[in-house]
Amino acid sequence: MKRPVLTAALSFLAACATAPRPDVVETGVAAGASSEGATAPAEAPLAALFRGPCLGRCPEYQVEVYPSGEVRFRGVRNVAVVGEARGRLDATQLAKVSELFEAARFNGLAGRYENIDTADMPLVIIAYKGRMVRHAHGDSGAPPELARLEDALDEALGTARWVAGEVDR
C-alpha cells in the first residue's frame, strides 16, 4: 500500500517544482472533459492538493491550479473521474485561492503534521507557490485551519464535479 502513495506523492512533488516547465502545446480540452495524453502547462502551479489513499473508500486524486486559471485534476481511485480532467477559474476565483492561503497563514504552518494518532487516515499534501505541507489526517496535533484550508481549496477549485460527480451550480 505504501508504494502507490510514494509514487503519487513523488509525482505531486515534481509537479509543484518552482522551476518553469518547457513550452508545451495545449490540447484544447473543455472544462471537465477527459484529457488523455494532454501535456502540462509551461508554468508552475500556483496551488496544488494531493489526497492519498486509505484502506477504505477515500478519494485519491491530485488537483493543481495555475496562475493562468487552468485547473488540472487527476483522479486515481474512489472518484467519479478516473484519469485527467480540466477546468478554469476566472480572475476573481483565482484571487480567492490566494486569499484562502493567506487567511490560513499557510506560510506559518509547519511543513509536516504526520504523528498518526488514528490508523487508516489519508495523507494530504497541499502546496502554494512551491511551499508544501504534509498532513496525515490522523495527526491530532495538526491545526484545524489546515484541514479547513484543504477543504476550502477543493471547493474553490470545484473538485466535487470530478470527485463525487456533482454538477456545478
Image (tube, grey):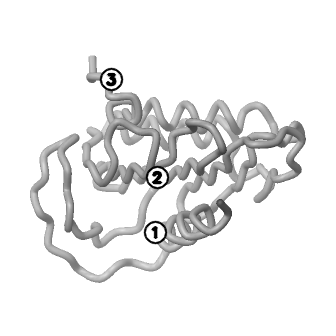
Q: What element carries label 2?
A: strand
Residue drawn where x is 32% and y is 42% of the image: 81
Residue drawn where x is 62% and y is 54% of the image: 125
Q: Nearer the viewer, mark 1 or mark 3?
A: 3
Q: Mark 1 points at which residue?
A: 15
Is residue 25 found left or right of 118 in the rendered image? left
* First in residue order: circle 2 vs circle 1: 1
Q: Kindly give the residue lying farthest to the top in the view shown.
A: 169
Which quadrant does the N terminus fall into? bottom right
For residue 166, which numbered disc appears in the image? Answer: 3
Which quadrant does the C terminus fall into? top left
Q: Name the residue under label 2.
A: 62
Q: Is residue 131 above or below residue 152?
A: below
Is residue 76 found left or right of 80 in the rendered image? right
Work out whether residue 148 or residue 38 is closer to the camera in this orientation and state it.
Answer: 38
* Amino acid at circle 3: Glu
Expressed as whole percent of the image width and height from the top left, the position of residue 141 reads 89, 40
Q: How far apart are marks 3 and 2 (CA)?
A: 17 Å
Q: In this view, does 148 lie above or below 9?
A: above
Neighbour tally class for label 3: few under 14, some 14-19, many 20 plus, Cα within 10 Å = few
Neighbour tally class for label 1: few under 14, some 14-19, many 20 plus, Cα within 10 Å = some
Expressed as whole percent of the image width and height from the top left, the position of residue 73 reads 36, 50
* First in residue order: circle 1 vs circle 3: 1
For residue 133, which numbered disc appears in the image? Answer: none
Is residue 130 found left or right of 81 in the rendered image? right
* Amino acid at circle 2: Gln
Q: What element carries label 3?
A: loop
Q: How far apart are marks 1 and 3 (CA)?
A: 26 Å
Work out whether residue 42 or residue 115 is closer to the camera in this orientation and state it.
Answer: 115
